[in-house]
Image (tube, rainbow, N blue to C red):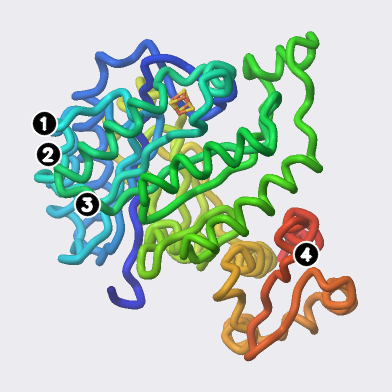
């Protein structure tokens, strides 16, 4: 990987069914568009890259449900990446998958097409919790999917779990954690449920069908996970992510180091060459917009919905808030000062002293990091590091 190497996020906006808590950009009635959509992504790759053949070192197919795409379509998109970008020979190429949508032939075929890391949305092993989330798989399906992934040569896999959900208890959470640990994943992502506006789950909350999640219980669940995963040899390298040594997600590290990544596909967000942008959300509109002939130039395609140059203040806030997420790495204070011409202490004046006095952050070896106390209050720390966007 070179210093200028980028990451590519490719959004696949299709699902068979919408889960009760989901507010992702995904559609359940557009499965017929899948092949045209794969061609659209190839068109967008060509538009964005232009003549440059930028070096790239990670690709991430997120969704939606990328495992609803045929191996041929995924292969076609990956051929497009190789044609228009200088993809590193050892590039990390991840796809998200729903456990119930894969079999051995499928996993073997996507591995042959170039996928070398897989992320399964497990969420829970408890039937009543999976039912509340309206997930369509059960844990037996997860176990089978993991076995098949290994057989197909995809042994670098992540499992996602959700805590902080209504009705979940500390023992039921521990049961989910221990069950996924038995599968010996390379990587675990643990997310606290947020009940998003407009979702069925929010309606259930408003009409009293479910009780609001208890934030103190969620904190206890997080603490339990930290202890249990440390015991099992996982490195807690990001607030919500744990990895076996050498198995951190390279793609997400690009986000957390505030590096350059391209977001392609309906509703994707990107940050590259000092520009933040997002793509139109509706897949049909996306495909139509890609027919336009006036290409804005790197990093934008004709399907961009909004873009803006990142202001100095935005870059400062983004740098601190993303890098503090990395619990071991933290923020390199000298590199920050060299980049922005001022130290964190100069820019934030009393705020940094206050964070240090409250023991939410600490400085060691020239790096600013969240303390363990800060892990639990990270959103409040980040809020204090946000600057007005005007430069
Ligand atoms: S599978 Fe994921 S993206 Fe699809 S509806 Fe469920 S939560 Fe949303």
The residue at the point 20 percent across, 58 percent down is 85
Q: Secondary structure at mark 2?
A: helix
In the rendering, at what x and y percent does residue 83 appear? 12, 53
Position above or below: 146 against 344: above
User: Is 284 on the left or on the right of 191, as rendered?
Assistant: left
Residue 222: x percent and y percent?
66, 49
Q: Is residue 11 above or below residue 310?
A: above
Residue drawn at point x = 61 percent, y = 33 percent: 172
**Mark 2–mark 1 contact, CB under 8 Å?**
yes
Tag 4 residue:
373
Q: Nearer the viewer, residue 146 or 208?
A: 146
The answer to whether residue 133 is visible is yes
Between marks 2 and 4, how big is the CA–CA gap? 44 Å
Asked whether the beta carbons under mark 4 and mark 3 sit within 8 Å of each other, the answer is no
Residue under numbered circle 2: 108
The crowd level at tag 2 (other Cα within 10 Å; few <14, some 14-19, many 20+) is some
Task: For the C terminus, give its image quadrant.
Answer: bottom right
Of callouts 2 and 4, which one flags the residue occurring earlier in the amino acid sequence? 2
Residue located beneath label 3 in the image: 116
Q: Is mark 2 within 8 Å of ligand 1?
A: no
Left or right of 90? Residue 227 is right
Q: Earlier in the sequence, mark 4 or mark 3?
A: 3
- Residue occupied by mark 1: 105
Task: Give the CA distance from mark 4 to mark 3.
Answer: 36 Å
């Amino acid at each position: 990987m070179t210093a200028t190497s980028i990451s590519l996020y490719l959004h696949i906006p299709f699902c068979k069914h919408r889960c009760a808590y989901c507010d992702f950009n995904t559609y359940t009635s557009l499965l017929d568009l899948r092949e045209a959509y794969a061609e659209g992504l190839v068109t967008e790759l060509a538009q964005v890259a232009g003549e440059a053949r930028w070096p790239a070192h990670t690709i991430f197919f997120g969704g939606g449900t990328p495992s609803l795409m045929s191996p041929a379509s995924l292969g076609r998109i990956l051929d497009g990446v190789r044609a228009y970008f200088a993809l590193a020979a050892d590039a990390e190429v991840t796809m998200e998958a729903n456990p119930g949508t894969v079999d051995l032939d499928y996993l073997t075929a996507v591995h042959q097409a170039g996928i070398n890391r897989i992320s399964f949305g497990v969420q829970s092993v408890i039937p009543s919790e999976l039912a509340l989330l309206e997930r369509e798989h059960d844990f037996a399906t997860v176990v089978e999917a993991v076995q098949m992934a290994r057989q197909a040569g995809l042994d670098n896999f992540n499992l996602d779990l959700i805590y902080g959900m209504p009705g979940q208890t500390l023992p039921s959470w521990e049961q989910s954690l221990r069950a996924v640990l038995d599968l010996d994943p390379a990587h675990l992502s643990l997310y606290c449920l947020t009940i998003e506006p407009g979702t069925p789950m929010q309606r259930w909350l408003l009409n009293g069908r479910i009780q609001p999640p208890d934030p103190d219980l969620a904190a206890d669940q997080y603490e339990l996970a930290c202890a249990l995963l440390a015991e099992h040899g996982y490195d807690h390298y990001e607030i919500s992510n744990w990895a076996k040594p050498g198995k951190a997600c390279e793609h997400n590290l690009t986000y957390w180091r505030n590096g350059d990544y391209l977001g392609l596909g309906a509703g994707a967000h990107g940050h590259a060459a000092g520009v933040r942008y997002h793509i139109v959300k509706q897949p049909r509109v996306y495909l139509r917009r890609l027919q336009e002939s006036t290409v804005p130039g790197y990093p934008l395609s004709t399907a961009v919905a909004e873009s803006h140059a990142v202001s100095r203040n935005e870059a400062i806030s983004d740098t601190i808030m993303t890098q503090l997420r990395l619990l071991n790495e933290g923020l390199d204070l000298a590199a920050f000062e060299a980049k922005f011409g001022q130290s964190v202490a100069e820019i934030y004046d009393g705020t940094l002293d206050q964070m240090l006095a409250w023991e939410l952050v600490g400085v060691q070896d020239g790096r600013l990091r969240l303390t363990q106390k800060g892990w639990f209050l990270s959103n409040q720390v980040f809020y204090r590091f946000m600057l007005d966007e005007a430069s």
